């Protein structure tokens, strides 16, 4: 049995879409970050770091989008959610690692500077640097779509749902995402996929 713990609006959207793409039966359990549910004793038993996503696979818990998405692609190879070529698979994993280690933190710095610095002046500097870095990262993502249908090339992969996270965050953060023409056109292609649309709409309907 597969059970996904996610929070609407969080990076767990990537794993949620990836799981839906497999076509396998699963249970989706919302953990509302706005209500601090990730810090409850019950959830900390599932993921002691108090983060989402977490994927329970017959009681064994996997964490981190990169690991979960790679697992799903390998467990359901018939869905072709990763390139078959080992070098291309490694390139896909490297892109997801960049998302988690560089792109995600830049947005966190722009939205939650108090987590990274004390004092108003220092926090303002962290926020401004974070906004500049996040926008530069979004521009780089935009360049990755130039001349391609999907982020890794002609094949849709689990890297695509991860890239969708940052477009949504950019809109929520007031960034001029429409200026990124390739990224925006790709998002429209993503939203035409029934699996993507189903998950996005279902998360929007979760009461926060």
Image (cartoon, rainbow, N blue to C red):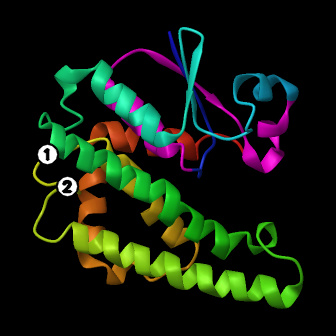
Q: Quick check: marks 2 and 1 in contact, CB under 8 Å?
A: yes
Image x and y of residue 149, in percent: 14, 58
The question of residue 13 being in magenta is answered with yes
Image x and y of residue 21, in percent: 32, 31
Residue appearing at x 50%, y 75% in the figure: 134
Residue appearing at x 82%, y 45% in the figure: 35
Image vertical order of residue 191 relative to residue 144, above or below? above
- Left or right? Give the position of 161 relative to 127: left
- Left or right? Give the position of 145 relative to 4: left
Residue 144 location, quadrant: bottom left
Task: Report the residue marked by disc 1.
Answer: 155
Tag count: 2
Which of pointers 2 and 1 lies earlier in the amino acid sequence? 2
Asked whether residue 164 appears in the rendered view, the answer is no
Image x and y of residue 20, in percent: 38, 29
Q: Which mark is residue 95?
A: none
Q: How far apart in space, not on screen, are marks 2 and 1 (Cα)?
A: 6 Å
Q: Which residues are magenta?
A: 11-40
Nearest to the observer: residue 170 or residue 47: 47
- Left or right? Give the position of 120 relative to 186: right
Image vertical order of residue 120 relative to residue 94, above or below? below
Residue 106 location, quadrant: bottom right
Image x and y of residue 49, in percent: 73, 38
Task: Report the residue marked by disc 2.
Answer: 150
Image vertical order of residue 107 relative to residue 192, above or below? below
The question of residue 188 being in magenta is answered with no
**Mark 1, other Cα within 10 Å: few <14 / some 14–19 / many ≥20:** some
């Amino acid at each position: 049995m597969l059970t996904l713990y996610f929070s609407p609006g969080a990076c767990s959207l990537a794993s949620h879409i990836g799981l839906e793409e497999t076509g396998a039966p699963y249970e989706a359990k919302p953990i509302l970050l706005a209500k601090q549910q990730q810090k409850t004793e019950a959830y900390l038993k599932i993921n002691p770091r108090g983060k989402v996503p977490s994927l329970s696979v017959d009681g064994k818990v996997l964490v981190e989008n990169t690991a979960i998405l790679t697992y799903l692609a390998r467990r359901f190879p018939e869905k072709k959610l990763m390139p078959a070529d080992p070098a291309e698979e490694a390139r896909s994993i490297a892109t997801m690692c960049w998302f988690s280690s560089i792109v995600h933190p830049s947005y966190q710095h722009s939205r939650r500077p108090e987590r990274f610095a004390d004092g108003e002046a220092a926090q303002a500097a962290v926020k401004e640097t974070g906004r500049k870095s996040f926008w530069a990262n979004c521009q780089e993502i935009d360049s990755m779509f130039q001349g391609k249908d999907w982020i890794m090339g002609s094949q849709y992969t689990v890297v695509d749902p991860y890239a969708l996270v940052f477009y949504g965050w950019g809109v929520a953060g007031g960034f001029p995402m429409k200026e990124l023409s390739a990224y925006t056109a790709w998002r429209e292609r993503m939203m035409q996929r029934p699996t993507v649309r189903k998950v996005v709409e279902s998360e929007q309907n979760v009461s926060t």
